[in-house]
Amino acid sequence: GLQDRAITRDLEWGVPVPLKEAEGKVLYVWFDAPIGYISSTMEWAQRTGKPEEWKEFWMNPQAELIHFIGKDNIIFHAIVWPAMLMGHGDFILPTNIPANEFLNLMGAKLSTSRGWAIWISDLLKSFPPDYIRFGLASVMPETKDSDFTFDDFRTKVNSELVNNLGNFVNRTLSFIKKYMGGRIEKDINGFKDEDLKFIKELEEAPSRIGGYLEKFEFKKALKEILALSARGNQYFDYKEPWGTRKKDPEETKRTLYLCTSLIRSLSTLIDPYLPFSAREIRKMLNLEKALSWDEASNWRWDRDIEPGEVKILYKKIEEEPIEIEKELKGEKKMETISFKEFEKCVIKIGKIVEASEVEGAAKLLKLIVDIGDKKVTLVAGIKDVYKPEDIVGKEVPVLVNLEPRKIRGILSEGMILAADLDGKPVLLHPDREVPPGSIVR
């Protein structure tokens, strides 16, 4: 059965528990945070001038509530939060809670505190938004932990976006513009054999891809979309319009008609992943609006096909690493500081006299450290490597004139210096015992 789970913490920060007998306790963050889903919807409704509109999302039995979360938060979204909603009685319950595994970065766990992370704003300096959306969608950790690397990102963008999808769109529309007078009539007929097989695949694809999306199998859906584009390239090559355009122009028209029909469908199917590309394709096709998902299975045109200006949809990513990549790989030239700046850092040897866990924190230990003239409190992210009882009595270098800051309600008055080995801290110690407060020069 279900085990009891505490919803309060003994911390100095947080939302106080509104009970006399719980004085000094605060609510655990993932007990009260989901309430913000509702309050933020209320705030949105007020801003839009429809203060009651939030109820359509949270109290309407026809609405569907889905939580997209990480695997470390399943319990609170699947048990605690629904229990709160049921206890209140007026709100709908989650119908599905897709939980992803963890996405790592270049073989190591993401950590903003260690600087092992990539900010989207940095990526956008080097890549269009659709490249980034595609790269992340292709490595979504849906069923197991996955890893993002720049080498893999380049390979996938160049092979799937540039050489597959972008190539299919460009070769088809450019052929129409260059060799067919920029126009294919709407009432083309006479399709046979490979054409009919291709039509059947086009008609069935939206339903199959939509089914994956409805089951939150985003990588499978993306794989099907790319396979459909690859099928378009295969069909184009098989029909050889460059060879039939003189000896059998009608056959060439049939080929380009169906290829353009697939491009039109793809402009809808890729929209959840590549909205900017979808918009650009529709512009090249002179489509005023996107097809609905159901309409994407229709291969017939109700007007002549007359592409507008044909542009290169994607450009190849070169092998040269970008700035953020150089930083992560340690290839970027190190920024230097003056000796005068370095002299501002006061580093002393401190002796750990007390160590305890910080409640509710997976990696933090609270340390009392003797630095000679006084004892200071430090919060260190070393719990996943060191047990409190194993480090009491150890001597470590401490940056003692770092500006104090509160971490989990505890004022940390400095920083322990440690080595980083594969993302894990390794404490440093003098090779022989020295008095606490000894200056490190």
Image (cartoon, helix red, strand yellow):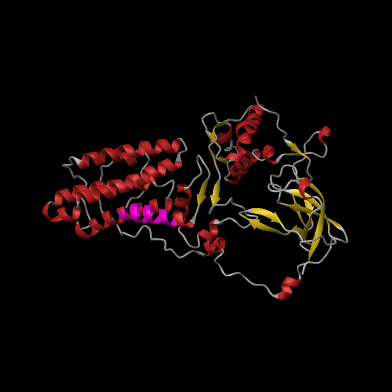
- Can you say which quadrant of the picture contains the N terminus? top right
- Against 427, residue 38 (above or below) is above
Whether residue 269 is visible here, answered yes or no, is yes
- Name the foreground residue: 432 vs 408: 432
Residue that extends furthest to the top in the rendered view of this protein: 1
- Against 70, residue 316 (above or below) is below
Residue that extends furthest to the right in the rendered view of this protein: 373
Residue 48 screen position, x and y as percent: 57, 45
- Can you say which quadrant of the picture contains the C terminus? bottom right
Residue at figure coordinates x 47%, y 38% from the top left: 216
Left or right: residue 141 versus residue 234 is right
Residue that extends furthest to the front in the rendered view of this protein: 432
Residue that extends furthest to the left in the rendered view of this protein: 247
Residue at figure coordinates x 58%, y 55% from the top left: 117
- Name the foreground residue: 122 vs 190: 122
Residue 9 falls inside the magenta stretch: no
Where residue 332 sits, quadrant-wise, is: bottom right
First to last magenta residue range: 153-167
Residue at figure coordinates x 61%, y 54% from the top left: 422
Whether residue 304 is visible here, answered yes or no, is no
Residue 215 screen position, x and y as percent: 46, 35
Residue at figure coordinates x 19%, y 44% from the top left: 187
Residue 108 screen position, x and y as percent: 57, 52
Main SS, magenta region, reads helix
Where residue 42 sits, quadrant-wise, is: top right
- Number of labels in the image equals 0
Residue 6 screen position, x and y as percent: 73, 34
